[in-house]
Structures are given as structure tokens and as C-alpha cells.
Image (cartoon, rainbow, N blue to C red):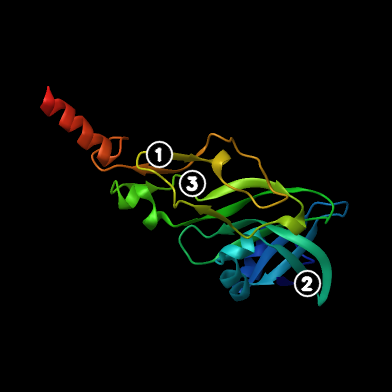
Amino acid sequence: MKFNATTRSVQGTSASRRLRRAGRVPAIVYGGNAEPLNIELDHNETYHAVRKEEYHSSILDLIVDGKSVGNVLLRAVQWHPYKQQVLHVDFQRVAKNERITTKVPLHFINADISPAVKLSAAVVVHPITELEISCLPADLPQGIEVDLSTLEGGAVLHAGDVKLPEGVTLVQQADLVVANAQVRGGGAASSSDQAEDGEEAAGE
């Protein structure tokens, strides 16, 4: 993926305001062995790009003044408090032989066919929607699929249970809750367990 930019020669709050009024976005590229590079971006192009999930978890080819300056990772986007306006963007240089640490989105699949939903009528909750991982740039996934097809009612899925792509390691705590199947009524037991408990009570 490519990101187009031009060199920004003037810095400061006033200069940034003028850029924004002109439909431009101030940005910076940092990291690596080079000095920080101040650049500016087209606002409309940037606005639509950064709203796409894949731009936040992809290695980007940064084009400055028509020439590629290397690979970067989108690190931060500053938004206006109430306007649909991008105020500033941060990029980090990446080297192909150096591991990077970043967050990637989780894509939950097959919850509707899981025992938790089909047998226990559970509600599957996702406390988090992304994981912090470490990998080489070439191994960076745009997202990680979390297959919930075997999730039981009342069960909890932790970060350490998520199958990661080859070359990717988990940075966050392995016991972090990624998904849980909440059985209606607040109990952690499945509906079949509850029925058995009721039969035992009736027998007493």
C-alpha cells in the first residue's frame, strides 16, 4: 500500500493551522537511523485511508515528493474532537530485518455455529478487538481470525488461546480475555447443566 506526501518545510502551530485550512494534514516520520521527516498529506486522501482497518496494520510504502522513502507503519492519528477532520499523523520507519511491535485487529468468526450459541443460547462478548503482537514486517498480518466454532456456553477464550500466524508472537498477557460466552441468566453453566441440576433437585 502506498501513502503520498510532500515535504513540509515550515513547522509550528500557526503553520499547521494554515495547512489544515488549505486541506492539508501535517505529519511526521520518525525512527530508524534517520532524522525525523516533516511531511504534509492531502486531507481527503488521508481521511478515507485512515478509516480503513488495513491501513493501521499494514506496511506502507511512503512516497514523498514523488519518490519512495521506504517502508513505514502508521502509528498514530490525531482527530479533531468533534469534526470529521484529521489533525496530525505519525509514521514510524521499519526495517525488513527488525521486529516491530504493534496492534492488529481481531476478526471473530463462526460464533453463530458454536455450541455456546446453538445449544446454550449464550451471548458471545468480545472485551477486546485487537491484540498487541511482535513480528518482522514481512510477517505482519492485517488481522487475526479467531475461530469461535467450538466455544462452549460459559467458556472463556484467552489471548494465549488464539492461534497466531507463523512468525508472530504475542506481546500482551496470555490470560487476557478475548471472548466469553455469557449464558443468559448470568450463570456460567450451560443450559443442559442447569436442566440436570433441576432434575436432581426435583428428585430430592
Q: Is residue 12 visible?
A: no
Q: Earlier in the sequence, mark 2 or mark 1?
A: 2
Q: Residue at x 70, y 62 (%)?
A: 27
Residue 184 percent coordinates (x, y):
26, 43
- Residue sitting at the far front: 203
From this view, report whether residue 17 is shown above or below residue 127: below
Dividing the picture into quarters, in which one does residue 186 lie?
A: top left
Amino acid on which disc 1 is placed: Ala
Q: Earlier in the sequence, mark 2 or mark 3?
A: 2
Q: Relative to residue 117, is residue 165 drawn left or right?
A: right
Is label 1 or label 3 in front? 1
Dividing the picture into quarters, in which one does residue 183 lie?
A: top left
From this view, report whether residue 66 is shown above or below residue 150: below
Q: Nearer the viewer, residue 123 or 25?
A: 123
Q: Relative to residue 104, is residue 153 drawn left or right?
A: left
Q: Which mark is residue 119?
A: none
In the picture, the quarter occupied by the N terminus is: bottom right
From this view, report whether residue 157 is shown above or below residue 84: above
Q: Nearer the viewer, residue 166 or 78?
A: 166
Q: Are marks 2 and 1 in contact (CB under 8 Å)?
A: no
Residue 134 percent coordinates (x, y):
70, 46
Is label 2 or label 3 in front? 3
In the picture, the quarter occupied by the C terminus is: top left
- Residue at the spot of label 3: 128
Q: Is residue 155 visible?
A: yes
- Residue at the spot of label 1: 155
Q: Residue at x 66, y 49 (%)?
A: 102
Q: Nearer the viewer, residue 27 or 137?
A: 137
